[in-house]
Amino acid sequence: MSSPYVIPHRAIFSEADLRQFLRSNAYEMILRFVKHLNESVKGKKLTDDIPVSKNVESVLAVLATLNTWIDEIPPIAQPMRFGNKAFRTWYDRLVDESPRIHEAMLDPPELKEAAIELCPYLIDSFGNRVRIDYGTGHETSFIIWLCGLHKIGFLRQADFPAIVLKIFHAYLVLMRRLQKVYMLEPAGSHGVWGLDDYQCLPFYFGSSQLVGQTNLAPSCVHDDGTLQLHHGEYLYLDAVK
């Protein structure tokens, strides 16, 4: 019996291909997943006591492991504005270890064969090895990885608040450290189109968190004291800070 999983490959090469993707079931699935994640954290703080399942803990453990690799692979001492080449060593370790990471994480055993489809999305979640840059496309790859984990049943709808407030937050912490330590350049050759050079979703999910609260006005993003006081509660304020 053939596997239902395939190694992802590029399929968008033209505007016509893009239009076809925007009409596809895959696009609808990803968009619906992101919208449901957003709804799940409406009015919730990062500090709220939310259920964390065993499988959410497994994903958090993966991100914690990737974080320790930064300590083991220090940046190379060389003059540069962007792009410390030690990032390529970190990235290569991720490529090498990704199959083992999924093998250890995915349970029950019948989910393990999904690794061939999931690995490329995880690997692409942390930047480009050649350019040593990072941007919203890589952030999207991480969301697609999470969407894949949800589609195979590893992450469930009950996990959605924890996916945003625990997993995605841990991913942001890891990415900001990677950006700082290895000086990743903002990806994209057509300028920056958002509030942040690197990411978009902290503002989307973060705005949902702020729904219903009455103590913070939009102008608070200009107040360093307010940002310092509340950045640990809201993704939006943490991103601005």
Image (cartoon, rainbow, N blue to C red):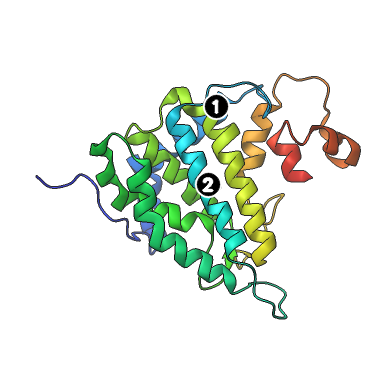
Q: Position of residue 191 (x, y in %)?
A: 67, 63
Which is more toward the observer, 205 or 102? 102
Of mark 2 and mark 1, the one earlier in the sequence is: 2
Q: Tell me where residue 94 sits by quadrant.
A: bottom left
Which is more toward the observer, 16 or 50? 50
Q: Position of residue 185 (x, y in %)?
A: 65, 66
Considering every residue shown, the one lying at the far bottom of the view is 79
Residue 63: which numbered mark, if any? Answer: 2
Tag 1 residue: 161
Considering every residue shown, the one lying at the far left of the view is 1
Q: Report the residue at 36% width, 47% height from top.
A: 102
Q: Residues within 10 Å of mark 2 (few under 14, many from 20)?
A: some
Q: Position of residue 136 (x, y in %)?
A: 57, 53
Q: Secondary structure at mark 1?
A: helix
Q: Secondary structure at mark 2?
A: helix
Amino acid type, mark 2: Leu
Left/right of residue 45 with respect to residue 4 in the rendered view? right
Left/right of residue 110 with respect to residue 58 in the rendered view? left
Q: Residues within 10 Å of mark 1 (few under 14, many from 20)?
A: many
- CA gap between label 2 and label 1 equals 17 Å
Q: Tell me where residue 8 sits by quadrant.
A: bottom left
Q: Disc count in the image?
A: 2
Which circle, 2 or 1, is nearer the viewer?
2
Q: Report the residue at 55% width, 58% height from top.
A: 69
The answer to whether residue 122 shows anywhere in this view is yes
Quarter of the picture containing the C terminus is top right
The answer to whether residue 191 shows anywhere in this view is no
